[in-house]
Amino acid sequence: MRVLIRCDASTATGSGHVMRCLTLADALSLKGAEVSFICRQQAGDLNLLIEKRGYRVDRITGKPLGWEADARRCGEFAADGGAASWLVVDHYGLDARFERRLHRYCDKILVIDDLADRPHDCDLLLDQNLYCDMESRYRGLLPEACRTLLGPRYALLRPEFVEARRRQGARQGELRHLLISFGGSDPTNETTKALAALEMLPTEGLFLDVVAGSSNPRAPSLQAACAALPGCTFHTQVDNMATLMSRADLALGSGGTTTWERCYLGLPSLTVVVAPNQRLTTEAVAAAGATWNLGWHAELSPATLAARIAELQGAPDRLTQMSARALSLMGDAARREHPLLALMYGGSNDGTKTDAA
């Protein structure tokens, strides 16, 4: 089976689309699929990382010129190698027009989305986020025959997280280890704000892990700031995030795909909304009691953040309750294979058109 994946990462938009597509690519490769990527070359892209993971990357270069130019270049890449079984599209800038144009190069199309703000012409749609109106959000935006997988129990998680959850014991609510991670590029510089908040708190007996992605332009200054904090370890472009989350008692990070990694491991969290598309999901997860929503990043001060951390230092019951509710959102911990793989290989889940968490 040949699979093409169209996704992008950049300093401005972050790395979430590429990272979840890499998770899918790895799972498909283990089943024998031939997977390659089509990505724009731009500041903060992860094209070299994708190649390091063993996948071909066809690069779209030059100034972005809209969906038609994107479709033309993708068609040229797709035609080189014969018809694909699947095209995976994980891109907020592309819609049904792009997908219709690319149908001639592939048998089926999978769209990964979470905005529900534009029509799609696809055979399968995955939205792994939580919303109060999950089952109605895509009404009128999809073909009648399109199969949908909706909700966090369909989150694309790397095998390391599945294995870590199998080993994970019950969390006790004691706050001794704090994890700070704001994704690949942290475009709004929330990590610096978090470190400033910690400088306002007594941190004796508190261990800190601070993670910065390879596309974070402030990594050197963050590393220097971490060196000045007792008990603080700085990490860059880690490959053991599941381990860091497992040993943490509380995480501080943004919304987005990492939300589901934290929830899957029952890790209590303080979530900062750093992009408009994170707002509704973060509100829904907070309403379920699985995180504390700190709101829009520009309205959050280091002093307010410090107060929230201090409040949780003295609230073990609240932390254990948050952990339990996070776990409850994520469904079966023992799944051996993502349901998406069965659908892409011609199988089915339960015979229904739509599956929602």
Image (cartoon, rainbow, N blue to C red):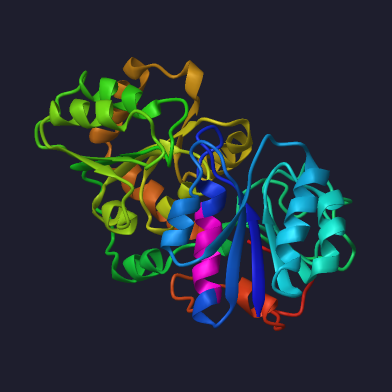
Q: Start and end of the magenta stretch?
A: 19-28
Side of 47 where 219 appears, left or right: left
**As rendered, which of 224 and 304 lies closer to the eye?**
224
- Is residue 189 visible in the rendered image? The answer is yes
Q: Nearer the viewer, residue 55 or 169?
A: 55
Q: How many marks?
A: 0
- Would residue 276 be counted in the magenta stretch? no
In the depicted structure, whether residue 331 falls above or below residue 201: below
Dominant SS in magenta:
helix
- Is 61 placed left or right of 168 in the picture? right
Q: Position of residue 114 (x, y in %)?
A: 67, 48
Quarter of image, res 111: bottom right
Q: Is residue 176 left or right of residue 298?
A: left
Give residue 339's quadrant in the image.
bottom right
Q: Is 62 above or below relative to 201?
A: below
Left or right: 104 in relation to 337: right
Quadrant position of the C terminus in the picture:
bottom right
Camera-side residue: 122 or 253? Answer: 122
Instruction: Say which quadrant the N terminus sits in.
Output: bottom right
* Residue 305 in picture, x, y percent from top left: 35, 23
> Is residue 55 depicted above or below 279 in this figure?
below
Q: Residue 129 location in percent, x, y?
A: 60, 51
Q: Please identify the quarter of the rendering in which residue 143 is found.
A: bottom right
Q: Residue at x 70, y 79 (%)?
A: 350
Q: Position of residue 125 (x, y in %)?
A: 73, 61
Instruction: Residue 331: tell me if it is visible.
Output: no
